[in-house]
Amino acid sequence: MFKSKLFWAIFLFLITFIFYFFSVDNIWFSLDDCGNVISGIIKSKKDLIRIFLEDERNYLYPINFNVPQSNFIAGFYRPMQHIFFSIIYYLFDFNVKAYYFLNVFFHAINISLFFYFCSFFVPIGLSVLAGLLLAFYPIMDWITWISTLHNFLATFFMILSLISFRFYWVKNKFIYNFLAALFFLFSICSRENTIFLGISIFIFTLFICEYKDFWSKIKFAFNKTYLILFVYIVYITIKIMAFGFESLPRTINNISMRLPVIKKLLL
């Protein structure tokens, strides 16, 4: 039993879920939660299209606040969490504990998935330890912030993408390659902090390739990861359609103020 991956995956899920769910008695929406949840509820086909074409910042501020105009770099493109918020809304209305349940559920399932992914490379004991370290790292008070669901979703789809790619690497079946790319797209559409996953997979494939010739390595890595790399084209195209270029000079100027080296390159 103690050598079973399924046993430890379930154990890690339960211990994480029980600890976080029952450690909170009183909870309420905070910061930008109300605007984010209410404004993103899908009530029609028009709303479904809207959440995939709007800057999430439009939901976070009062109606009399002038939100900076978006562009394909600066816009907050995070539609995935509003699908789950809408499901919770129709099932439990505005019961805040249900939204907190969603955060805890995805955190717990991420721990199980992370353990499973680690078990491909290290012994089960070390994989369990890795799962526990991720489950109970020191700063976890933000789990009660309902609007951080996008972090849990981005992690959830990222790990699924990595697991799918590992199966593709071993079994060489197209379906796993497709799933790896699809989950990667879902991940960056949850939150953009996983944007470098595709490039990282490409570089990893490049380095472990057995070919000695550099161009053969490039060709091999591209053949393995072309669907994942294609996700970048899809993602950027969607963001351009949603946000455009109009405020791009302002964003470049803001970035160059933080990173002077960029300003020097542009001059």
Image (cartoon, grey):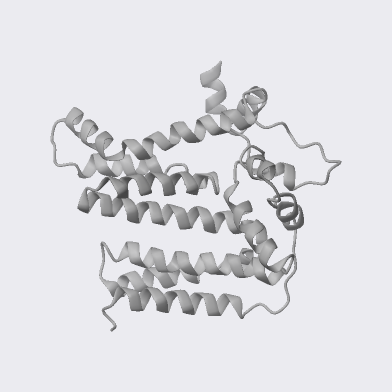
User: Could you say where residue 209 lies in the image, as x and y percent from the top left?
Assistant: 19, 41
Residue most extreme to the right: 64
Above/below status of 207 relative to 114: above
Location of residue 59 with respect to 214 vertically, above or below: below
Q: Is residue 36 left or right of residue 209?
A: right
**Residue 145 appears in view:** no
Residue at position x 43%, y 52% in the image: 158
In the picture, which quadrant includes the N terminus? bottom left
Of all residues shown, which one is farthest toward the front? 45
Tell me how many marks there are.
0
Is residue 38 in view? yes
Image quarter of the C terminus: top right
Q: Position of residue 149 (x, y in %)?
A: 60, 58
Residue occupying image coordinates x 73% and y 34%: 68
Rendering coords of residue 164 (x, y %) = 33, 53
The residue closer to the viewer here, 224 or 174, is: 174
